Image: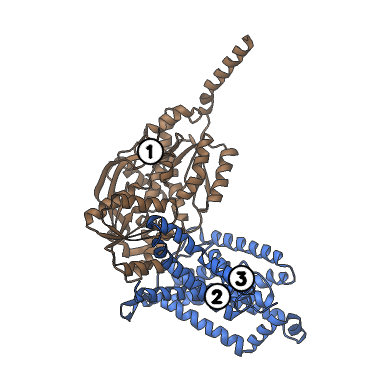
Chain colours: A brown, B blue
Amino acid sequence: MKLKTLALAASATLMAAGPAFAAGHAIKVGMITTLSGSAAGLGAEIRDGFQLALDQAGSDAIELIVKDDARKPDVAVSVADEMIQSDKVDIMTGIIWSNLLLAVAPNAVRQGTFYLSPNAGPSALAGKGCHENYFNVSWQNDMLPEASGEYANTAGYKNVFLMAPNYPAGKDMVAGFQRTFKGESAAVVFTKLGQKDYAAEIAQIRASGADAVYYFLPGGMGIAFGKQFAQSGVDTPRFGPVFSFDQTILPAVGDSAIGIHNTTQWSNGLDNAANKKFVEGYQAAYGRLPSFYASQAYDTANLILGALKTAKPADKDAFREALRAANFDSVRGDFSFGNNHHPIHDIYVQKVVKRDDGTLTNEVVAKVVDDMVDSHAANCKM
Amino acid sequence: MSTVLILEQALNGLQFGVMLFMMSAGLTLVFGVMGLINLAHGSLYMIGAFAAAVVATWTGSFMLGLIASLAAAAAMGALIELVVIRRLYDRDHLDQVLATFALILILSEGTRYTFGSLPLYLNTPGWLSGVFDFGGGLVYPKYRLAIIFVGLIIAAGLFLLIAKTRLGIRIRAGESDREMIAALGVDISKLYTIVFALGASLAGLAGAMVGVLESVEVGMGEPVLILAFVVIVIGGIGSIKGALIGSLLVGMTDTMGRVLLPPLFSQFMPPIDAVPVASALASMSIYILMAIVLIVRPAGLFGGAK
């Protein structure tokens, strides 16, 4: 009996000492992102944004391991297994695509690893499927499209052609838009994820007689569509969430994008100190304007650095609370987590403009929604 | 659905079809004449696109870019034929698949090493920008018309080459009896190198022309390679005519499937459920077409019994 008590006491002391021991070592962050194929540019933005925050903090508290998923769910799953089992990472982040995130995150958080999403925010993980170790630092997928729906209402569009790739985020992007848009959908077209030739879809847009085209085509898909649309002679106005008109797309599609309105939670001109430090630091370090992907990864890194000031991942409950407190200065201004660990933040509408030096970029036009909470939060029992 | 829309979609199907033909012509010749399965054909498509991108950016001339794509892909084709492929003719198909798969990895990583992972983007040349107005409301991008035009010229050229020239006679002879034409004193290894380089240059040209529309990146050839294999299986292995008909069938089926299936499914399902299902089915349509062709004609539409 006495021996048992002693053993218990000993193990309790060890457990209490655990975080203190870990404090001496850097915590490991595993980043899985897309660094090859037509979306390689997006992964580079995530990696560079995250790295910039670490460099600016000058802290060696985080050891970053970066691996490529090639936008393939099977590759992402095997890289994640390797990171959890042999690298023993404390936190995972980096995934851009909702279908890859759904393959990786639920499994990772069940095994006790924290997952902080710097981009994808599928509805499946925001409502009933929310998890205490899963945090989304970007947005729930439906948020920017819902704001686009509001924008379309004020712009007076009555009949809109909708297009998105056929995968979980594409469906969220269409559902979110239709939730707030009061007009009609001229047609809903789901394309193949990674599709490069949009001739058939552009012909449908031409024939549809729609007032405007709402589309969600991130990365190389958006570039291919943008270039082909510009060559097609169709002049239907285009708009949508930022993904199809961001800083990774504009230089490749050129002047044809000028004037397009899109919705976003962040813009490089947002007037706050954290954002100035980020945009200037990013341009100095990488010689290009940051995209919203980089801003989200930068926020993710700063969220982790902020949380590490009060807790270490080894003490899961304390670290979770520290993350939930969101103790960092977000480049988007106001930022807090809702009950489902998804952001509550303002959404803006911005417009593609050409600066005097010839650079194409987005400029904020107006705020569309104040302190937006996502539509799935109520279904999360947390 | 209006006539104008159907005509425009038919042009889209035709454009996709001729692009596939440029890709599959070489594949089917190499398979037919040398009995070789060449998985690295997609890499030659990629090499053509990169060569065009580099030369067009450097010289500012799109035409020079296209010539460079033909030359670079033909040169790379001849090189890998001499160094690697030549040793594979007498091996079984599994060895060929393994070796040419290794070539894909080497060429892809070599390109990634040279150009990086970020895709390159090319602009349509000024004189092919914009649309051509057919009248009656039908307009079509000039650049896509140019692809159709080039593809049809190449198809005609290949038929003439095979039917009328000495090289064509040798290719046909090689297809039907390899030992016999070697015995008749034809330099078979030179013939193989020429056929391989010819097929490679067409793949390179296809890559360059499509690269302008889409993007030039590592691994761009593999999705097209899969479609090219579907085409030559449908058309009958070794048959140029089969490759042409197969390409046009696949191009039309893919385009029309994408356009016609969603509205069709929406007739008897709520649209929000119908569209994803129909889109998924549309991307399967060409494989269903291939299955049907194989059931009816196991050797493909124009494949001889072997």
Q: Which amino acid does label 3 sit on?
A: Ile
Residue B299 versus residue A144: which sits nearer the camera?
A: B299
User: Residue tagged by mark 1?
Assistant: A379
Q: Of helix, strand and loop, which one carries label 1?
A: helix
Q: Disc 1 is attached to a residue of which chain? A: A
Task: State which quarter of the image contains the C terminus of chain A.
Answer: top left
User: Residue tagged by mark 3?
Assistant: B295
Q: Can you say whether A223 is above or below A110 in the image?
A: below
Marks 1 & 3, CB-CB < 8 Å contact: no
User: Residue tagged by mark 2?
Assistant: B246
* Mark 1 Cα-neighbour bin, 10 Å: few <14, some 14–19, many ≥20: some
Q: Of helix, strand and loop, which one carries label 2?
A: helix
Residue B65 in the image, given as x and y percentages of width and height: 48, 74
Q: Give the residue displayed 59% in from the left and 86% down from the top.
A: B161
Whole-number angstrom distance, CA of label 1 to CA of label 2: 51 Å
In the image, farthest residue toward the front: B268
